[in-house]
C-alpha cells in the first residue's frame, strides 16, 4: 500500500522504521514543524523528520487543514495513513481522504487511558499491565474502532520512559501487522467497549510536583510516571525546585514525618504518609543531576541535625 506516515517524537521513530522495512511504500511523512530547543532556542527538527530525511522520504510540516493541504494529501494518492503521536487534531475532511483511513497507534489498551499521556498515567495508577492499540481515527479523542492490540507487563521499577521504549518497539510490529491485514482484507474494525474508559491528559509541571503527605507507594509511582518528562520535583525551603529521579520505598524507616529529610553518608531519606523513600538522583537548581548523597554533602547549610530540612513545605 501507499502510506503517508504522521508522527513527531522519538517513540514514533520505531514505527516509521518498521514501515520503511515492510512491504508497504511510505511515500511521505507528515510531522510537526521544527521547534525551538536548548538554551539558544534554536529550531530543531522532530525526531521523525530527522529519521525520514535520513531515509530519503519527503517530509511535510504543513498544518493539516485548508484546501491547499487537502490538495497535497489527495495528490499523494495514499491507501492509508498510519499515525503515531503526531500532535495535531485532524478534521473530518482530512480523515476522509485515505481509502482505508488514518490508522493510529496508541500506547494503551483502549478504552483505558485515552489521551496524550497514557503511559505516564498507567505507571502513576499502579497498573500491572498495559499495551498498545491500533484503531481508526475518528472525530473523538481516541474513540475510533479498534483494529489490533498487544499487551505489556509494567515492571515494578519501570519509569514511563522505560515502558514507552518497550511499547514503541512492540507497537511498531503491531502497526505493520495491522496494515498488512487491512491490505489483505482479513481485519474488521471493532467498536471500543463502553466500560473501562479512563482519561490520560497531558501532564503539566504542576502535576509532577511530589506531595510528601501521600503514601510512599504513591510518591514512588508519581516520580516514575513523570520520568523523564515532565520530570518530578519538590521544593526546597527557599521555594526553588529540586528535580527528582526515581526513588525507592524504604518500609524499614517509618518514623520520618512527611517531607522531612534524613541525610546519611550513603543515602538520603524523605518521610511520607507511610514510610520513607530513598532518593536516587536529584537535580539542584542550575546543576546537572547527581546522586542524592553527593547533593546532601554539598548542601550542608540546608541541614541542621539531619532532620530539620523539610521538602515541599510551601505546598
Image (spheres, rainbow, N blue to C red):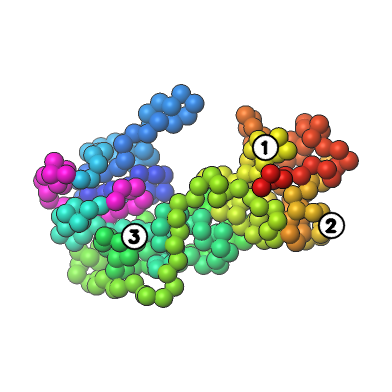
Q: Residue at x 30, y 42 (%)?
A: 31
Asked if residue 79 lies in the magenta stretch, the reply is yes
Q: Where is residue 256 in the image (x, y as percent from the top left)?
A: 81, 54
Q: Is residue 249 in view?
A: no
Mark 2–mark 1 distance (CA, rounded to whole Å): 25 Å
Q: Residues within 10 Å of mark 1 (few under 14, many from 20)?
A: few
Q: Residue at x 20, y 45 (%)?
A: 65
Query: In the image, what residue occupies the spot 41% across and 54% down?
Result: 116
Which badge, 1 or 3, comes first in the chain's sequence?
3
Left-right relation of 162 to 261: left
Which stretch appears magenta? Answer: 66-89
| Mark whose residue sits in front, 1 or 3 | 1
Q: In this orientation, which residue lies closer to the viewer: 58 or 101?
A: 101
Label 3 sits on a secondary structure element that is loop
Residue 165 locus on image (x, y percent): 48, 52
Quarter residue 237 falls in: top right
Spatial CA distance of label 1 from label 3 is 37 Å
Q: Which mark is residue 141?
A: 3
Instruction: Give the CA separation, mark 2 to mark 3.
Output: 45 Å
**Mark 2 or mark 1, earlier in chain:** 1
Relative to 110, does residue 234 appear above or below in the rendering? above
Read off the residue under disc 1: 239
Q: Compare marks 2 and 3 and give the one earlier in the sequence.
A: 3
- Residue farthest along the top direction in this orientation: 40
36 versus 91 height, above or below: above
In the image shown, does 20 or 73 lie closer to the viewer?
73
- Quarter that holds the N terminus: bottom left
Residue 134 place in picture, x, y as percent: 33, 63
For this orientation, the residue located farthest to the front is 314
Q: Where is residue 200 in the image (x, y as percent from the top left)?
A: 45, 59
Amino acid at each position: 500500500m501507499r502510506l503517508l506516515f504522521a508522527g513527531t517524537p522519538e517513540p514514533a521513530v520505531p514505527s516509521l522504521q518498521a514501515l520503511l522495512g515492510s512491504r508497504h511504500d511510505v511515500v511521505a511523512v507528515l510531522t510537526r514543524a521544527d521547534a525551538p530547543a536548548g538554551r539558544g532556542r534554536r529550531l530543531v527538527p522532530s525526531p521523525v523528520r530527522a529519521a525520514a530525511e535520513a531515509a530519503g522520504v519527503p517530509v511535510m510540516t504543513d498544518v493539516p487543514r485548508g484546501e491547499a493541504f487537502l490538495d497535497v494529501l489527495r495528490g499523494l494518492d495514499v491507501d492509508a495513513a498510519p499515525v503515531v503521536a503526531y500532535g495535531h487534531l485532524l478534521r473530518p475532511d482530512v480523515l476522509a481522504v485515505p481509502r482505508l483511513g488514518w490508522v493510529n497507534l496508541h500506547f494503551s489498551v483502549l478504552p483505558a487511558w485515552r489521551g496524550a499521556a497514557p503511559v505516564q498515567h498507567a505507571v502513576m495508577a499502579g497498573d500491572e499491565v498495559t499495551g498498545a492499540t491500533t484503531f481508526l481515527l475518528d472525530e473523538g479523542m481516541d474513540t475510533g474502532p479498534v483494529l489490533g492490540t498487544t499487551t505489556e507487563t509494567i515492571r515494578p521499577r519501570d519509569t514511563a520512559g522505560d515502558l514507552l521504549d518497550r511499547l514503541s518497539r512492540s507497537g511498531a510490529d503491531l502497526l505493520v501487522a495491522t496494515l498488512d491485514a487491512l491490505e489483505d482484507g482479513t481485519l474488521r474494525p471493532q467498536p471500543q467497549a463502553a466500560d473501562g474508559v479512563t482519561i490520560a491528559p497531558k501532564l503539566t509541571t504542576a502535576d509532577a510536583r511530589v506531595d510528601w503527605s501521600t503514601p510512599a507507594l504513591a510518591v514512588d509511582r508519581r516520580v516514575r510516571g513523570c520520568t523523564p518528562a515532565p520530570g518530578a520535583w519538590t521544593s526546597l525551603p527557599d521555594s526553588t525546585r529540586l528535580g527528582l529521579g526515581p526513588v525507592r520505598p524504604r518500609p524499614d524507616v517509618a518514623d520520618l514525618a512527611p517531607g522531612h529529610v534524613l541525610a546519611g553518608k550513603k543515602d538520603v531519606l524523605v518521610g511520607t504518609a507511610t514510610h520513607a523513600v530513598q532518593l536516587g538522583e536529584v537535580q539542584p537548581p542550575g546543576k546537572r543531576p547527581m546522586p542524592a548523597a553527593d547533593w546532601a554533602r554539598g548542601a550542608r547549610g540546608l541541614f541542621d541535625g539531619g532532620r530539620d530540612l523539610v521538602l515541599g513545605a510551601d505546598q
